[in-house]
Amino acid sequence: MKPEPLLSIIIPAYQEAMGLVEAVNTIRSHADALCAVEYIVVDDGSTDATWQVIENLTATQPSVRGVRLSRNFGKEAAITAGLKTANGDVVVSIDADLQHPPELIPEMFKLWKSGAKVVNTVKQTRENEGLIKAGLTRCYFKLFHWLAGIDIGNAADFKLLDREVVDCLIALPERERFYRGLVAWVGFEQKTVLFDVAPRKVGNSNWSSTKLLRLALDSIVSFSTTPMHLMTFLGAGFGLMALFLSVRTFSLWLTANAVPGFTTVILLLIIVGSILMTGLGIIGIYVAKIYDEVKRRPDFIVREQTQFRQGLPDNDR
Ligand code: UDP
Ligand code: MG
C-alpha cells in the first residue's frame, strides 16, 4: 500500500494577529481528516502580535509550523517562502482572513487524487469589493490575457499544487514573482473550482491601491513585452502621419498660397513629444525590471522558523 500523502497548507499572514487562531482552527477542521497535514503560517513581517500568535499555535499544535520573514516582503514573497519550506506531496495556499473558503479544500484534494496537478479557484462574485475595484479587476484580467497570452481568468491565490508543480515553481530563477501568472504559465493538468468570496472576518485588507497597481504593472511587465512592441507600432503610425503632414505642408509652401501652419508645428511637437515620453517610460519599466532581476537579491529573508519536528506531523490525533 502506498504511504499516506502529506498535505502542506501555506497561510501567508500580515497583521493577522486578531483572526489567525480562528482561521487556523477553521482550516484545520476541514483539512485534518484528509491525510497527514502540515500548516505553514508565514508571518510576512507583521508589526502586530502575529508572530507571537504563531509561536503559541506551534507550541500547542505540532502540525503547525511558523516561518517569520525579516520584514514585509508582500504576499507573493510570503507564498514563495511557504512553497520553499513545504514538505508536502501536495500544497494548498490559502488566505489567513477566511476569505478563501476552507470547505473547498476536501474537494480540491479529491481532484488532486483523481489526477489534477493544479486546482485553481475562481471567485464567482466580487460584490464585497465595491463596483470600481471589481470593474478595474475585471479589466486588468482581460488586459493581462490580451498582453501576456495567459488566461488567469479571475483565479485567486487559493490554489492546490502537486509537488511536481511546486518544484517547477521553486526552480524558476526569477525574483519578482506573480504567483497566479506563474502557476498558469507552468501548465500541467489544471482544474477549476468556483467559490463565493466571504467578507473579511476581522481586520482590513492589507492591499493599498498603490500596492495593487504595482502588482498589476509588475505582473504585466513580467509576462509580456507587448507594450514595448505596441510602442514601436505606435511610433511607426505617427511617423507615417508626420510624413503625410510634412508633404502637405511642403506642397503648400511650394504653391506659396498659404502660411505654413503654426498649429501643425505645435501639434507635431506635442504628439511626437508625448509618444516619445510614453515610449521611454515603457522602456524604463522594463529596464527597471532587468535591474531588479540582475541584482539577484533573494525575494525574501527568513528571520526565524519554529523548530521542525522529525517525521510527519501527527495532526494531534
Ligand atoms: N498578506 C501578506 N503580505 C502582505 C499583504 C497581505 O502576507 O503584504 C496576506 C494577508 O495576511 C492575507 C492574504 O495575504 O492572508 C490576503 O491579504 P488581504 O486580505 O489583505 O488581501 P485581499 O483579500 O484584499 O486580496
Ligand atoms: Mg482578504
Image (cartoon, rainbow, N blue to C red):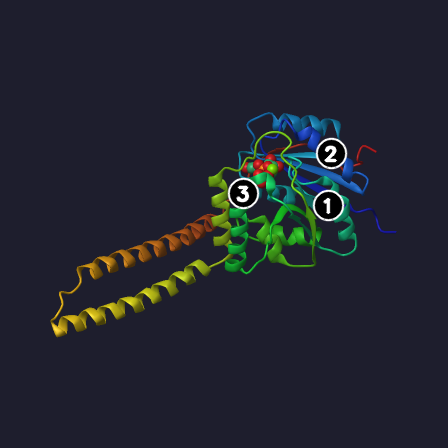
Count residues near mark 2 (Cα–Cα under 10 Å), then give few for <14, some for 14-19, many for 20+: some
Badge 2 is on which residue?
A: 26
Q: Position of residue 103 (x, y in %)?
A: 74, 41
Q: What secondary structure is marked by label 2?
A: helix
Q: Quadrant of ligand 2?
A: top right
Front residue of 74 and 241: 241
Badge 3 is on which residue?
A: 131
Q: Mark 3 to mark 2: distance in Å?
A: 30 Å
Q: Would residue 311 be visible to someone looking at this image?
A: no
| Earlier sequence position, callout 3 versus callout 2 | 2
Badge 1 is on which residue?
A: 88
Tag 1: residue type?
Answer: Gly
Tag 2: residue type?
Answer: Thr
| Earlier sequence position, callout 3 versus callout 1 | 1
Q: Position of residue 211 (x, y in %)?
A: 49, 40
Q: Which mark is residue 262?
A: none
Front residue of 197 and 11: 197
| Earlier sequence position, callout 2 versus callout 1 | 2
